Amino acid sequence: MDSKVRDNPEMHRFERQIHAGMLAAAYYEVDGERLVFVHVETPEFEGQGIGAALIKGVFDNLRERGQKAVIWCSFMQNFLQTHPEFNDVVDPIFGQAHPSILVEAILARPPGS
């Protein structure tokens, strides 16, 4: 098993190889410099820590790149409740915002911003 988490921007996801071609993935949308995380998948491996390892790798990657995350995914929100050491990676304005709040804020921005 490859424990390295990689960004796959073409698929809008961070990936972690599990085995034999199976991947754990954290899906995102791009909002300017921020990544908006919408879903995490760990097929057939629930409860084995693979999702947590994926999220740690995602946050470490974002920290190294100087990017911020907006968290819509409930799994990632729950992870952050017990791992405050990653709060610096979460956007302080939208952090764990409900999607409707973020959409309203994005629509209210001036064009081109």
Image (cartoon, rainbow, N blue to C red):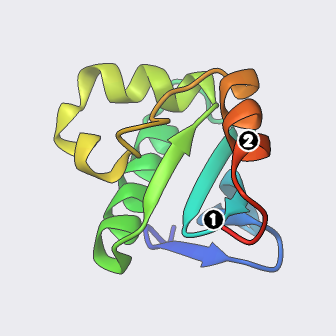
Q: Amino acid at mark 1?
A: Glu
Q: Position of residue 89 (x, y in %)?
A: 33, 52
Where is residue 60, by image quadrant? bottom left
Task: Tell which of 106 and 90 is nearer to you.
Answer: 106
Neighbor class of circle 2 (other Cα within 10 Å; few <14, some 14-19, many 20+) is: few
Q: Amino acid at mark 2?
A: Ala
- Establish if 96 lies above or below 81: below
Quadrant containing the C terminus in the rendered view: bottom right
Task: Tell which of 38 and 102 is nearer to you.
Answer: 102
- Establish if 50 lies above or below 68: above
Disc 1 is placed on an element classified as strand
Task: Tell which of 16 and 33 is nearer to you.
Answer: 33
In this rendering, would 23 be left or right of 88? right
Q: Residue furthest front?
A: 110
Q: Which residue is mark 2?
A: 108
In this rendering, would 50 be left or right of 35? left
The residue at 49%/43% (across/down) is: 50
Disc 2 is placed on an element classified as helix
Q: Which mark is residue 44?
A: none
Q: Which mark is residue 15?
A: 1
Q: CA distance from mark 1 to mark 2?
A: 33 Å
Q: Position of residue 74 (x, y in %)?
A: 60, 22
Q: Position of residue 83 (x, y in %)?
A: 24, 31
Whichever of callouts 1 and 2 sits on the residue coming sooner in the sequence is 1
Q: Position of residue 1 (x, y in %)?
A: 51, 67
The residue at 63%/30% (across/down) is: 73
Q: Is residue 44 visible?
A: no
Q: Is residue 7 visible?
A: yes
